[in-house]
Image (spheres, grey):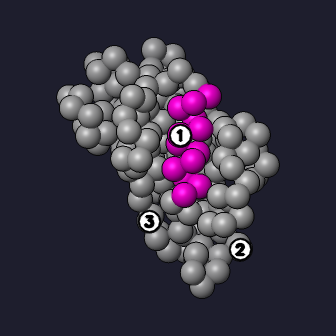
């Protein structure tokens, strides 16, 4: 596995273990890459609760409860859907923090408004006001499918760091 992903995953595991937090992920365009990186490391079970690969809209609705109206109104690659995915991952897990990733890895599927390389992220923290959303849109450009997925996984791992949660956790 990519050494940079493994190093980021190790930092996430160490920091969340120290903070006493567990994590979950709802992944679309990364197809489980975040969870694969985390679980590649021995001892991950102390921190990782579960992951959801919700590649299709149906999977987003069935597995983590994303509302069909949100998908139809905003599209799968949107802050609204990423937020719903993160909230759904928390609701359907025992994790303390969840990250969601949805995007267009290419080579096709892009539009003028959402070109290939557009990836949307959201993080939800249990016990925090769900309206206090943390979300981000990145435009990686057309770096190729593998590199877009790798870059997206790196951003998602960073969002799982306790200090990025703004929750006062060290």
Left or right of residue 162, residue 53 in this image:
right
Q: Which residue is more in the foreground, 62 or 20?
A: 62
Location of the C terminus (image quadrant): top left
**Disc 1 or 2, which lies upstream in sequence?**
1
Near mark 1 (Cα within 10 A), the count class, few <14, some 14-19 or many ≥20, is: many
Q: Quadrant of residue 62?
A: top right
Q: Position of residue 42 (x, y in %)?
A: 48, 18
Q: Which residues are magenta?
A: 80-92
Tag 1 near tag 3, CB within 8 Å: no
Q: Which residue is mark 3?
A: 138
Q: Does any portion of residue 18 appear in the rendered image?
A: yes
What element does badge 2 sit on? loop
> Is 5 part of what is drawn in magenta?
no
**Disc 3 or 2, which lies upstream in sequence?**
2
Q: Which residue is mark 1?
A: 87
* Residue appearing at x 58%, y 25% in the figure: 93
Residue 108: image tag: 2
* Residue appearing at x 51%, y 16% in the figure: 45
* 38 relative to 65, above or below: above
Q: Position of residue 117 (x, y in %)?
A: 54, 69
* 55 relative to 141, above or below: above
């Amino acid at each position: 596995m990519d050494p940079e992903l493994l190093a980021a995953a190790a930092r996430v595991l160490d920091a969340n273990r120290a903070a006493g937090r567990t994590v979950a992920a709802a992944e679309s365009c990364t197809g489980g890459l975040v969870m694969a990186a985390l679980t590649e490391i021995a001892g991950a079970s102390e921190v990782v609760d579960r992951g959801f690969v919700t590649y299709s809209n149906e999977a987003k609705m069935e597995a983590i409860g994303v509302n069909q109206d949100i998908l139809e109104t905003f599209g799968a690659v949107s802050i609204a859907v990423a937020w719903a995915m993160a909230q759904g991952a928390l609701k359907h897990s025992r994790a303390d923090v969840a990250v969601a990733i949805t995007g267009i890895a290419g080579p096709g599927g892009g539009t003028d408004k959402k070109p290939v390389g557009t990836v949307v992220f959201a993080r939800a923290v249990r016990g925090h006001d769900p309206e206090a959303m943390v979300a981000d849109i990145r435009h990686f450009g057309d770096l190729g499918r593998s590199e877009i997925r790798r870059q997206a996984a790196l951003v998602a791992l960073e969002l799982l760091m306790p200090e990025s949660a703004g929750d006062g956790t060290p």
